[in-house]
Amino acid sequence: MIRNLSKKYKPKDGPACHGDLKRIIHHGQKHGYNGPTPLLLIRSEWTTRPPKVLSSERLKNLLKAIDASEDIQAADMMPLYTGMRRGEMFKLLWSDVDFERGFINIRDPKGGVSQKIPLNEQAREVLENHPETADHVFTRDDGKPFNDIHKRVNAIKAAAGIKHHFRALHGLRHVYASMLASSGQVDMYTLQKLLTHKSPVMTQRYAHLHDEALRRAFGPCRDIIKNATSQAGPGGGGSQ
């Protein structure tokens, strides 16, 4: 069914349908409808597919558009610096932001268990300069929290010249994760915690970036080993 939908309609419609069906079943289970759930046993081939990310040029254009935007709520919500989900930012309270200890408390995330993520330097700067007008960090003009903001973030995306198929908030979450994975300085377990993934399966989509970083790091290591062994000379040089 998933394959046929992807062929008949758009490539993304198959996995989107699979995800919707799983959410419906989870919703039923949460409210006490306990029946056969065969769809939960199906692991979609798209689950671990590497997500598409922006090129460096488009990312630069988007950062310029964010800086130039007069819509401070939408611009500050772009999750490039924290990787938070859209719903997590909608629910974020000022009391969840611990400036003193340097953490953001994410209440009831998608994984179900409240977690803390580090408040990095960039995110701290954004939040310290963000207007505090209500209990929620991000609010509409009437002071109430958002339940949708796609038109406002899409306006920033359009100003950057980015095509409509790139999801402004969700896509930047992938950019954040990809940058961390490709840095080679964050292991997959830490990345899972930063992204608040309940299962490591979702984090595995970034494993190829982490592996590439390790391979790049092996080049200098190989040269160091080669130089050390050549200096030791025949017989080893145990003192070194």
Image (tube, helix red, strand yellow):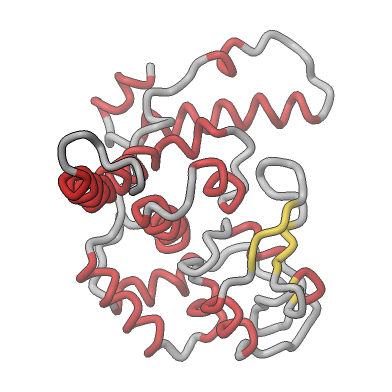
Q: Estimate the x, y position of residue 165 in percent, counting from the top left.
A: 30, 54
Q: Residue at x 55, y 34 (%)?
A: 200
Q: Estimate the x, y position of residue 4 in percent, counting from the top left.
A: 30, 19
Would you say residue 216 is visible in this rendering?
no
Residue closer to the observer: 220 or 101: 220
Residue closer to the observer: 73 or 150: 73
Residue closer to the observer: 121 or 52: 121
Would you say residue 189 is visible in this rendering?
yes
Q: Residue at x 37, y 23 (%)?
A: 45
**Quarter-of-image position of residue 132:** bottom right
Q: Residue at x 36, y 44 (%)?
A: 210
> Which quadrant would the N terminus be assigned to in this image?
top left
Number of numbered discs overlaid on the protein picture: 0
> Going by the image, does 163 lie left or right of 154?
left
Q: Is residue 123 above or below residue 189?
A: below
Q: Is residue 23 above or below residue 2?
A: below
